[in-house]
Image (tube, helix red, strand yellow):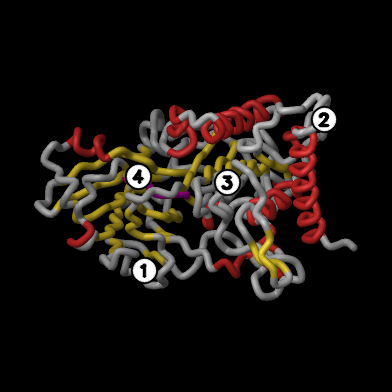
Amino acid sequence: DNNAEQGMLSASAFQEGVLDWLAQVNAQSGHPLYQHVDAENIFMGGHSRGGGATQASQTRSQPYVFHGAEQPALSLRGVVYFMGFDLRSFNTTISGSSNVYPIPAEQGRLPSLLIAAENDRDLFYPICDQFIERATGPATFATIYGACHNYMGDTTGAEPDYSSQGIGLPYITRAEQQERAFNLVVAFIKRWAGLDLSLEGLLYNNELAGSQEVGVTAWRNMTERVVVDDHQGGNKTANTLGGTNTLSSGTWTTSGGVYPTWGSLGTLGVRHNILTLSGGGETTYTSKIPSANQDLSQTRRVIFRVGQIDQAGRKGFDWVTVKLRLTDRQNDSATVTLFDRQNQYGQYLPDYVGSGNNYFDRFVEGNITLETFTQMNSNLNTDQLDSVEFVFETAQGAGRQMYLDDLRFE
């Protein structure tokens, strides 16, 4: 019927059929799979439009109402998206207007791994990017730098050249792309099927910080998480905790997101902190922590998402040194350099090595242990943290934009 949305939802029904088939043959004496399927550790995944089907399956991994009746949840351990189509780009998937079951703004709590290709010229930016914005359960969003859409297959050539539209050609090989993707997939399955906690660093912490191959940002459900600011409140001068936000120079806005408008994704109401910085100076963005929330000694890390917008073919953070400073109530402080434009090795943020103009080089995660700060200044009291500051030192004539989101302690 030429309805791409319903086609992907139908593919989710096919995934459900596969689950039913596995349960059947697992109990069928004489079948090669008899008693070989661990029904508690089944993962589903899909590439491209199959990723849209996977999103529908993730939605159905928790009880849902369809045609006025509650439907049983799919029994899945996790889902993997390879350059997945976000079904919320369709107007008919929004709750209240769907002629099929809706895709909610918030993703299900099922563990998920979401893999995007930096130079995807089929499901181009930002179709694959907003899953992480809506994560409620453990989610890892990984961008493979230099990758394209079609290299997930073994024979399909790269997509047409859209370099003139800001989407560069792939600059890694098919084998390199698949190796980087499958490394993440194996880690994800071992973490959630085998409960291998040694993989937490790769999936959810900072093991890939500064990588020139894969950019990772993640979200977990942590009972001790303290969100300082998710920038969704609509008032840029007040953070989520009720503290004040200030910018020493330049301009900033939290009235919308950094993503270009596409389809109905704008209905999600995603907001980011978008900073416009002048060249040749130092700018400090400060988020104050109210006294009632200053005891963060039970947390281990300060985490946030960050990105920058390319300009005139110039990519990456080469134009700006980025630092993070924590200050306590006694005015003791410690500062960690996240990216040094004059020494671009061993950074928390990546030094992009790609070619082409991909103007929005995806979010990456800043994930720094509090121990890193206290080792720099033993007088810093993590039970009385008063503020978080981002310090930006820009090169002469290099005024550009940064964007931030989900500043938190875990």
Q: Can you give x and y, in whole percent of width and height, for residue 93 in the image?
A: 70, 66
Q: Image height check: is 395 above or below 65?
A: above
Mark 1 sits on what residue? 236
Tell me which segment is drawn in magenta: 302-307
Q: CA distance from mark 3 to mark 1?
A: 30 Å
User: Contact (CB < 8 A) between labels 1 and 2?
Assistant: no
Mark 2 sits on what residue? 155
Q: Is residue 155 left or right of residue 338?
A: right
Q: CA distance from mark 1 to mark 2?
A: 48 Å
Q: Amino acid at mark 2?
A: Thr
Q: Amino acid at mark 3?
A: Gly
Q: Can you give x and y, in whole percent of width and height, for residue 251 in the image?
A: 37, 65
| Residue nearest the viewer, comparing 164 with 141 | 141
Q: Which of label 3 and label 1 is nearer to you?
A: 1
Tag 1 or tag 4, which sits nearer the N-term? Answer: 1
Q: Amino acid at mark 4?
A: Val
Mark 4 sits on what residue? 322
Picture residue at 88% right of the left edge, 61% below the top:
2
Categorize mark 1 by other alpha carbons within 10 Å: few (<14), some (14-19), many (20+).
some
Q: CA distance from mark 2 to mark 3?
A: 31 Å
Q: Amino acid at mark 1?
A: Lys
Q: Can you give x and y, in whole percent of width and height, for residue 346 in the image?
A: 39, 29
Q: Is residue 330 left or right of residue 147?
A: left
Q: Is residue 143 left or right of residue 319?
A: right
Q: Image height check: is 136 above or below 34?
A: below
Picture residue at 70% right of the left edge, 52% below the top:
85
Q: CA distance from mark 3 to mark 4?
A: 21 Å
Categorize mark 4 by other alpha carbons within 10 Å: few (<14), some (14-19), many (20+).
many
Q: Secondary structure at mark 4?
A: strand
